[in-house]
């Protein structure tokens, strides 16, 4: 894709729950904007069910933002493993990370921890057992293991 057709942003904030629109992601986006940092906020409110990681297509705006973003903040929540948009976008960013084109920063939101993903606990365990395979499974584990932040650490 040519640079002129790519949607350029400094930071891409990626999360899966609609309720974040009014809380963490909104505040994070506002903080970046106050610092004159261009932000693309992607949220999955479609409610699409996970079927297969081979037949899911990203929306054009999301694909364009992926190609033009320097940093991604991945906000992990308990429902991420059930969001095709979240999982496919995560895989695309990890591919760009391997090429040295983007920095991926995980944030564990609420009660979510790295060990929940690694040990496949709670909703992550259900998703791993029922449908997560191949690159979505590997992407979720890889991203969770990157150096990140726990959102509750900022409240102290």
Image (tube, grey):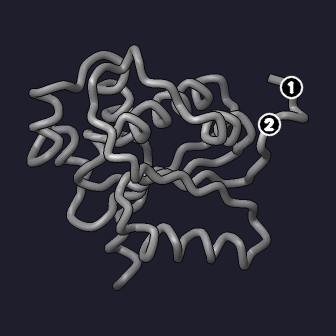
Point 33% across, 39% down: residue: 48
Q: Mark 1 and mark 2: span between their CA atoms? A: 7 Å
Q: Which residue is mark 1?
A: 2
Is the residue 131 above or below the residue 45 in the image? Answer: above
Is label 1 in contact with label 2 (beta carbons under 8 Å)?
yes
Q: Nearer the viewer, residue 139 or 65?
A: 65
Residue 103, position in %: x, y? 61, 43
Numbered disc total: 2
Rendered image quadrant of residue 143: top left
Point 64% across, 48% down: residue: 71
Point 49% across, 51% down: residue: 14
- For label 2, the crowd category at 10 Å Cα-Cα, with few meaning under 14, some 14 to 19 and many 20 or more, is some
Asked which secondary structure carries label 2, the reply is loop
Q: Nearer the viewer, residue 94 or 49?
A: 49
Q: Which mark is residue 6?
A: 2
Is the residue 2 above or below the residue 8 in the image? Answer: above
Point 38% across, 52% down: residue: 16
Image quarter in which the C terminus is found? bottom left
* Horizontal relation, residue 124 to residue 65: left or right: left
* Horizontal relation, residue 138 to residue 23: left or right: left
* Horizontal relation, residue 89 to residue 46: left or right: right
Residue 50, position in %: x, y? 28, 31
Q: Residue furthest right?
A: 4
């Amino acid at each position: 894709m040519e640079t002129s057709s790519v949607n350029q942003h400094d930071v891409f904030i990626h999360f899966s729950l609609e309720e974040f629109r009014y809380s963490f992601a909104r505040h994070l986006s506002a903080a970046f904007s106050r610092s004159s940092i261009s932000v693309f906020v992607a949220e999955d409110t479609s409610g699409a069910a996970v079927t297969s990681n081979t037949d899911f297509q990203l929306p054009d705006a999301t694909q364009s933002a992926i190609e033009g973003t320097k940093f991604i903040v991945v906000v992990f929540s308990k429902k991420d493993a059930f969001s095709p948009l979240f999982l496919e976008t995560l895989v695309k960013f990890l591919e760009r990370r391997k090429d040295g084109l983007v920095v991926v920063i995980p944030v564990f939101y609420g009660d979510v921890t790295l060990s929940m993903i690694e040990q496949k606990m709670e909703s992550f365990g259900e998703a791993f057992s029922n449908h997560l395979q191949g690159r979505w499974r590997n992407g979720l584990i890889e991203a969770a293991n990157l150096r990140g932040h726990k959102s509750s650490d900022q409240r102290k």
